[in-house]
Image (cartoon, helix red, strand yellow):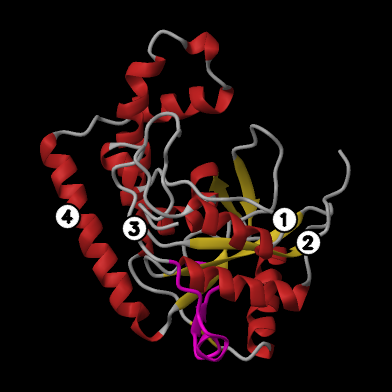
Amino acid sequence: PTPGRIPATGHFPQSAGPFALTGVVGPMARTMGDLKILFEVMQGPDIGDPSAAPVPVRWPDRNDLKKTRIGYFEDDGRTPVTSETRTAIKSAAEALRNAGFEVEPFCPEGLEKARQLWWKYFGIAGGMLLGPMTKGRDGELSPILKEFNSWVAAEPSHTAQSLLESWIERDLVRMQIFEQMENFQVLLCPVASIPAFRHRERRWQIEGKTVEYLDAWSYCEWFNLLGMPAATVPITSSGEGLPIGVQIAARPWGEELVLAVAHSLEQQHGVSRRPPEI
């Protein structure tokens, strides 16, 4: 969700400082109907989160919803995706057309800059928040948190100057991308380069290119940095039977639009099936 739309009360570590711009929380559910209920319950101001905003819930009218223009892309031109992921995007775009939406190819410029800035907030600023809490307690940390700490340790910490520059750059890249979205209220794109993977796998070969862990997830990182709400809808399955979803994203404070479009897509494709037993 947009930072401030759903309170991060109770999140550990506390979502504070620059990290709060990316350290957002949101609901997970099996159906869009359940997500809608959870969103309505969770959204709104809360005394435990000073960033939580009193934004009223505004569900789009059915007729107005179909006027929504959707731009879609299969990949960003930098990080390749699997052929099954491409198929999922094409299928979702066609399903939304069949549902009455205007759907056209469109990929905004500036996503690579957003990816680079994301790490400065989520990684470096987040590491500065976590570092004092985890120092000397490696034996208590999960493998992924240890790995995160090692990534952050390899980077220089923020200075007042670097943080100010990152803040300015974030505002500029947000303006750049939002201006490009003037004619597209919603974006449709992959969630990641790959479907579900084994624990501790960190690189894959896709279309002849080695894709690293954080790059595979760059399709989520942009919206996190940009403060754009997004939802994932399962569309198809990999050869192993694991679900492959697509991502629906909108401009800030457009959670209701995201969920409404995602619900239309779910109606076309049906509710996802359970993955195979392990």
The three-letter amino acid code for the residue at tag 3 is: Pro
Q: Which residue is mark 3?
A: 54
Q: Kindly state the secondary structure of the residue where label 2 is placed.
A: loop
Q: Nearer the viewer, mark 1 or mark 4?
A: 1
Q: How would you rate the neighbour count of disc 1 (Cα within 10 Å): few for under 14, some for 14-19, many for 20 or more?
A: few
Marked residue nearer the N-terminal end (1 or 2)? 1
Q: How would you rate the neighbour count of disc 2 (Cα within 10 Å): few for under 14, some for 14-19, many for 20 or more?
A: some
Q: CA distance from mark 3 to mark 4?
A: 26 Å
For image coordinates 37% across by 41% down, the residue present is 122
47, 64: nearer the viewer: 47
Tell me if residue 267 comes above or below residue 246 in the rendering. below
Q: How would you rate the neighbour count of disc 4 (Cα within 10 Å): few for under 14, some for 14-19, many for 20 or more?
A: few
Q: CA distance from mark 2 to mark 3?
A: 33 Å
Q: Which residue is mark 4?
A: 168
Q: Kindly state the secondary structure of the residue where label 3 is placed.
A: loop
- The picture places residue 228, in percent across and down from the top left corner, at 40, 62
Asked if disc 1 and disc 2 are in contact, CB closer than 8 Å, the reply is yes
Asked if disc 1 and disc 4 are in contact, CB closer than 8 Å, the reply is no
- The picture places residue 25, in percent across and down from the top left corner, at 47, 46
Q: Which residue is mark 1?
A: 30
For image coordinates 37% across by 25% down, the residue present is 130
Asked if disc 1 and disc 3 are in contact, CB closer than 8 Å, the reply is no
Q: Nearer the viewer, mark 1 or mark 3?
A: 3
Q: Which residue is mark 2?
A: 272
Q: Kindly state the secondary structure of the residue where label 4 is placed.
A: helix
The three-letter amino acid code for the residue at tag 1 is: Arg
- The picture places residue 11, in percent across and down from the top left corner, at 45, 34
